[in-house]
Amino acid sequence: MAKFLCPTKLSENISETPEGYLLCLAVAIARTGVMEYGPGETPLEVGEDGIVYVSRDAEELFSSRAMASFEGKSITVRHPEKFVDPYNWKELTKGTMHNVRRASELDDDGEEVLLADVLITEAFAITLVKNGL
């Protein structure tokens, strides 16, 4: 588990590090069930209704392989047009995910949730989060 020094607490789940980064604890990064995405929100093609439907069950989401795949990965603002890769990470990455884990409670829709502690390191993304994104 990554540890961070956070002398300034901004809210119940967000603290500021001495460098000015934001550490957001227990952020829901994925959930079970069906998610709906609009055009351009994923690299997948939309259906006839203009929506992309992505379904995840608990067995898939909480597999050790899936959970490990999130650890240390990039945080972006919104869904970029392309997946983050070695050629575009510098442009797209605004922070990283750590301490990926299964939540002990269901969300408001009764779905199971995957949590991570998110370290946001890019100035504009920090401003967006402080302003409510």
Image (cartoon, grey):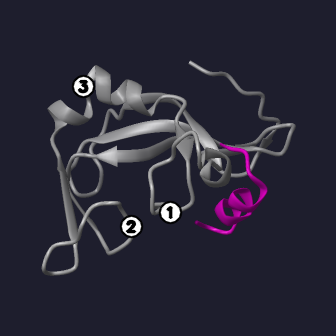
Q: Spatial distance from mark 3 to mark 1, Cα to Cα?
A: 25 Å
Range of residues picked out in magenta: 120-133
Q: Which of 24 and 61 is in front in this view?
A: 61
Instruction: Check disc 1: other Cα within 10 Å, few if <14, some if 14-19, many if 20+.
Output: few
Looking at the rendered structure, the kind of residue marked 3 is Ser
User: x, y percentage for residue 129?
Assistant: 65, 60
The residue at the point 22 percent across, 79 percent down is: 50
Q: Mark 2 points at which residue?
A: 41
Q: Name the residue under label 1.
A: 78
Looking at the rendered structure, the kind of residue marked 2 is Glu
Residue sticking out furthest to the front? 87
Q: Mark 3 points at which residue?
A: 63
User: x, y percentage for residue 116?
Assistant: 48, 36
Looking at the rendered structure, the kind of residue marked 1 is Arg
Residue sticking out furthest to the right? 18
Q: Which of marks 2 and 1 is nearer the N terminus?
A: 2
Provide the secondary structure element on which disc 3 rests: loop
Q: Which of marks 3 and 2 is nearer the N terminus?
A: 2
The residue at the point 55 percent across, 42 percent down is: 74
In the rendered view, would you say 38 is above or below 62? Answer: below
Q: Quarter-wise, where is residue 65 in the image?
A: top left
Residue 88 belongs to the span the image colors magenta: no
